[in-house]
Image: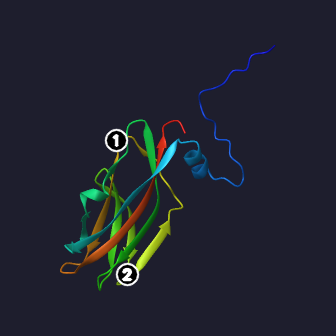
């Protein structure tokens, strides 16, 4: 009789009908994290983007990586504003939103963010403009080694 060795590592085995994301969710090695809310803002100048609210800050936990999958947002003001994806106090992506408009951007280029990195959502708007912004940012949190 031969012995069968079972590895404790989960190898990504999924079908053509199941994406990597679906597989990792199914086997419990990942979870969605949603950064969401409706927030008032007052523009400080187009060049002066700042984090919107501490509720939209996410720190990647130990032994995990994170990937921002999409950005959805709505601008209730009468002027162009933009959101920024900020990682460790550095803006890495920009998402303009027209007046009284909304966006949905599924990200094609998805960078892995390592444990301890801080992800924030910032907003820039012309000085004197005020309004509200609806924010929905989808982050995929993955156990290390996946």
Locate the N terminus by quadrant: top right
In the displayed structure image, the side of residue 40 where residue 32 appears, left or right: right
Locate the C terminus by quadrant: top right
Along the viewing direction, whichever of 57 and 1 lies nearer the viewer: 1
Seen in the picture, residue 36 relative to 46 is either above or below; the reply is above
Which residue is denoted by mark 1 in the rendering?
Answer: 116
- Using the rendered view, name the quadrant where residue 99 is placed: bottom left
Which residue is denoted by mark 2 in the rendering?
Answer: 98
Q: Residue at x 66, y 24 (%)?
A: 6
The local secondary structure at tag 1 comes to loop
Query: How many residues crowd mark 2 within 10 Å: few (<14), some (14–19), many (20+)?
Result: some
Seen in the picture, residue 55 relative to 128 is either above or below; the reply is above
Q: Residue at x 63, y 26 (%)?
A: 7
Dot label at residue 36: none
The local secondary structure at tag 2 comes to loop
Query: Label 1, label 2: how many angstroms apart (C-alpha)?
Result: 33 Å
- Using the rendered view, name the quadrant where residue 95 is placed: bottom left
Q: Residue at x 22, y 81 (%)?
A: 129
Color encoding of the figure: rainbow
Q: Position of residue 3 (x, y in %)?
A: 74, 16
């Amino acid at each position: 009789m031969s012995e069968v060795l079972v590895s404790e590592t989960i190898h990504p085995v999924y079908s053509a009908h199941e994406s990597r994301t679906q597989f990792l969710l199914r086997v419990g090695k990942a979870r969605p994290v949603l950064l969401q809310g409706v927030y008032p803002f007052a523009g400080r100048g187009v060049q002066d983007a700042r984090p919107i609210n501490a509720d939209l800050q996410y720190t990647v936990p130990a032994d995990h990586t994170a990937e921002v999958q999409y950005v959805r947002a709505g601008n209730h003001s009468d002027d162009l504003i933009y959101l920024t994806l900020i990682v460790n106090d550095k803006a890495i992506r920009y998402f303009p939103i027209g007046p009284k408009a909304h966006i949905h951007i599924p990200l094609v280029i998805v960078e892995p963010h390592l444990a301890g990195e801080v992800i924030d959502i910032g907003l820039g708007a012309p000085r004197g403009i005020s309004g509200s912004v609806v924010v929905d940012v989808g982050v995929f949190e993955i156990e290390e080694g996946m």
